[in-house]
């Protein structure tokens, strides 16, 4: 067991990819994990597997675009496990397309999930963590938070926003015992590219995503930030595959 044994960790977007791998790893290290996503059946299946391995886990159907559902999962963590040590704002979408394709509904969905969803996690967590006098926000951005590539303008904009919000949060919460970490993955195996409806972007991504990290690599980065002593705040990690 590591330094996260007994910690209570809420993970959004845990029904696949990075969120799922993180739930498995943290539970295997003795954390009490609370997972949310829209596909409840996938969460329940994951929870059953984790429990069979001896892990402790609770599930809740969650749409991060709905503030009250985010508040509810935080309440669930408090009710079941007595506190909230960390919130991993991981849920995200990536329906890439050129701007001139005018896929406005997809832009709006990315803004709603990738930005508003993270803000809802922050809004739900701040009051609880301030009252506790401790806590840890881990927000998942992307290498798209540092550079813009064709077809990814809106996705990158949402991730630049997550980076800015995370930095602002860290600065504003200074002195309150609350840690703030940004984890920015490079290409990672997951279901993320399945949300791409644009043909050109889909073809480009097939090539771009040929070399990818396993989702467990990002889970280990998250574990690293979490298991540091409470006076150590890992501010930012960028994790890419070796090419
Ligand atoms: P996946 O598509 O495998 O996972 C995304 C997760 O987000 C799913 O569990 C999905 O579950 C959930 N989700 C989507 N919309 C919502 C919503 N409205 N409310 C709650 N949950 C939601 O992709 P990844 O694991 O790759 O993505 C995780 C994060 O990592 C994202 O923020 C992504 O941008 C980021 N990232 C990923 C990279 C990669 O190459 N894979 C690279 C850089 C960053 P459900 O559909 O059940 O709701």
Image (cartoon, rainbow, N blue to C red):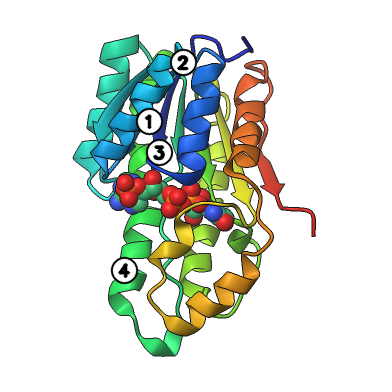
| Mark identifier at residue 46 | 1
Observer-side mark, 4 or 3, equals 3
Q: Is mark 2 within 8 Å of ligand 1?
A: no
Q: Is residue 192 left or right of residue 66?
A: right
Q: Are marks 2 and 3 in contact (CB under 8 Å)?
A: no
Mark 3 near mark 1, Cβ–Cβ under 8 Å?
A: yes
Kindly identify which numbered label has been placed on residue 14.
3
Residue at disc 3, secondary structure: loop
| Mark 4 touches mark 3? (CB < 8 Å) | no
- On residue 243, which mark appears? none
Judge left or right: residue 146 versus residue 42: right
Measured Cα–Cα span from mark 2 to mark 3: 17 Å
Locate residue 149, reporting x and y percent.
Answer: 61, 75
Compare marks 4 and 1 and give the one earlier in the sequence. 1
Q: Residue at x 53, y 23 (%)?
A: 26
Residue occupying the point 25% across, 38% down: 40
Q: Label 4 belongs to which residue?
A: 108
Which structural element holds mark 2?
A: loop
**Residue 11 percent across, percent down from the top left:** 42, 33
Q: Residues within 10 Å of mark 3 (few under 14, many from 20)?
A: many
Mark toward the viewer: 4 or 2: 2
From what the image shows, is residue 34 above or below residue 137?
Answer: above
- Closer to the chain start, of discs 3 and 1, is 3
Gap in Å between the C-alphas at discs 4 and 1?
30 Å
Disc 4 to disc 3, C-alpha distance: 22 Å
Q: In which quarter of the view is residue 209 placed?
A: bottom right
**Mark 1 or 2 closer to N-term?**
1
Instruction: Give the Cα separation between the discs numbered 4 and 2.
Output: 39 Å
Label 3 CB-ligand 1 distance < 8 A = yes
Answer yes or no: is residue 164 visible.
no
Image disc number at residue 53: 2
């Amino acid at each position: 067991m590591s330094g996260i044994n007994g910690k209570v960790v809420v993970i959004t977007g845990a029904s696949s990819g990075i969120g799922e791998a993180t739930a498995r790893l943290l539970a295997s290290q003795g954390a009490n994990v609370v997972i949310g996503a829209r596909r409840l059946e996938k969460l329940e299946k994951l929870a059953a597997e984790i429990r069979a391995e001896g892990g402790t886990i609770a599930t809740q159907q969650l749409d991060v675009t709905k503030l009250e559902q985010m508040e509810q999962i935080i309440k669930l963590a408090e009710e079941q496990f007595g506190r909230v040590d960390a919130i991993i704002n991981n849920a995200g979408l990536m329906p890439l397309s050129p701007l001139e394709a005018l896929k406005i509904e997809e832009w709006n969905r990315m803004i709603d999930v990738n930005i508003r969803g993270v803000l809802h996690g922050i809004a739900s967590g701040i009051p609880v963590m301030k009252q506790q006098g401790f806590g840890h926000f881990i927000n998942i951005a992307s290498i798209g938070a540092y550079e813009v590539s064709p077809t990814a303008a809106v996705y990158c904009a949402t991730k630049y926003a997550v980076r800015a919000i995370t930095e602002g949060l860290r600065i504003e919460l200074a002195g309150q015992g609350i840690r703030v970490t940004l984890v920015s993955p490079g290409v990672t195996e997951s279901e993320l590219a399945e949300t791409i409806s644009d043909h050109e972007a889909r073809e480009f991504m097939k090539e771009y995503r040929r070399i990818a990290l396993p989702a467990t690599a990002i889970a280990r980065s998250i574990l690293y930030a979490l298991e540091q002593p409470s006076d150590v705040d890992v501010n930012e990690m960028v994790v890419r595959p070796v090419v």
